[in-house]
Image (cartoon, rainbow, N blue to C red):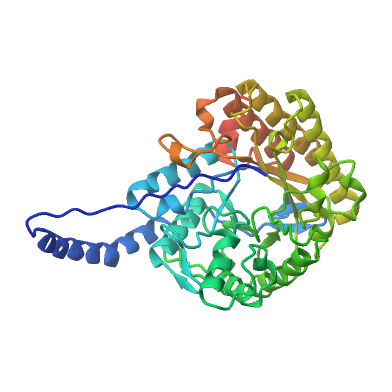
Amino acid sequence: MKKDLRSHWSLRKMVTRNGMLYPILGFASCVAFLYMSFGDLKLSANFTKGPRFSFAERNGTQFFLNGKPLYINGWNSYWLMAHSVDESSRPKVSAMLQAGAKMGLTVCRTWAFNDGGYNALQISPGQFDERVFKALDYVIAEARQQGIRLLLSLVNNLQPYGGKTQYVNWAWQEGVGLSSSNDSFFFDPSIRKYFKNYVLTVLTRKNTITGIQYRNDPTIFAWELINEPRCMTDPSGDTLQDWLEEMSAFIKSIDKNHLLTIGLEGFYGPSSPKKATVNPEQWASALGADFMRNSNITNVDFASVHIYPDQWFHGLGFEEKRNYVSKWMHSHIEDCDKELKKPVMFTEYGLSDQNKDFQLSQREQLYRTIQDIIYKSAKKKGSGAGALVWQFFVEGMQEYSDDFGMVPWQSPPIYKLTIEHSCKLARIQGLVQENGNLKQLCSKRK
């Protein structure tokens, strides 16, 4: 598990003098009305010229797109919706998506939730801020323009951006909560109803820019149920399993177009023989999650795993951690090749720059190890379907960063490595000659 993200919001104050606010507000309201009346029409026209997309599909252990195997080099930018609420900060969102496309990246994982707090999408159960929903509309439309698909996560197990804690607080405040425990998110009927309503609202949302309902938009690569789910009050795993089965079936009843994953960290549960041989330590099997059992749910299309060796081990040197990552990845790919018969994506991986012995070269070495394993699996038509680095930014966004974040072009070795991996995967898929950007990007890297 990575460290919790920092709080990113600050309240703004308006100071007025000499009674001048009211005429200014009147003029501003007129301008705002005109912009909302005609600005959206202009924006919509600009977003009708994007590339044609089709839905990503799964067949056995592989993803497919237009009948061809799909292997993914991608990244996390969790902040896209939050940074699209204000017009002034949207250029950074566009710049990040453009930069991803120029590196040959194809999928970006980002939050499709913000529950309670500043600039919340869901202000209270069933109550939504249209400004923030339009920000998410913008993210999806802009991603389509840049040829990027999105893996959209629907709720956080952690507290940043509300998470399951906010849902529990809502139920408690309304006097319907069964427990003040955060894990009641998974078993409280009222909270389950809150979440289902949220999911229904998001999946059936009609994008105000493209005019396409989210559930019908192939720009969305897949839905992720919950980021890093844990239910530590029930280490048997039954409570989380029941929730995952119910919610995955609910999503598929609304949206049969998109792929679905869970958002697991990848730890093996108490009944798995790998809990002692592959899990980082004993604590990992007592979190209420179980990679094999959870991922085997019928409505879950592909498995998800995270990679944070420096968060899981504190007494190992870098080389030992890198060797462990190789073991960790091969174990999960083997599981998906032989037992689960599904693709697996390593949807977060990173190395903290706060480690005592940290050197940027270590980050490059770890990333190369991860990408090489994905490439070798892809070359054998295996289940290792892709990996998403945590996390990328553009300049001037330090307040959104953590000890894993980076501006990729400010780290030339990482930037070069990322492009090389994109090109290697593109050649396997036969995409280099078909895609003008990839043809230019990869021509010098044969």
On the image, the x and y values in percent for residue 157 come to 63, 56
Q: What is the tally of numbered marks visible in this picture?
A: 0
Q: Nearer the viewer, residue 202 or 125?
A: 125
Residue 248 lies, in percent from the top left, at 71, 68
Q: Residue at x 76, y 30 (%)?
A: 321
Outermost residue to the right: 273
Quadrant into which the N terminus falls:
top right
Report the front residue among 365 and 357: 357
- The answer to which of 199 and 309 lies nearer the viewer is 309
Residue 145: x and y in percent read: 48, 51
**Above or below, 10 relative to 325:** below
Using residue 51 as the reference point, say whether residue 358 is left or right of it.
right
Q: Quadrant of residue 318?
A: top right
Provide residue 340's location: percent of width, then percent of height.
Answer: 86, 56
Which quadrant of the view contains residue 23?
bottom left
Quadrant containing the C terminus in the rendered view? top right
Comparing 264 with 299, the one in front is 264
Residue 204 in view (yes/no): no
| Above-or-below relation of 200 to 142 | below
Q: Residue 221, can we see it? A: yes
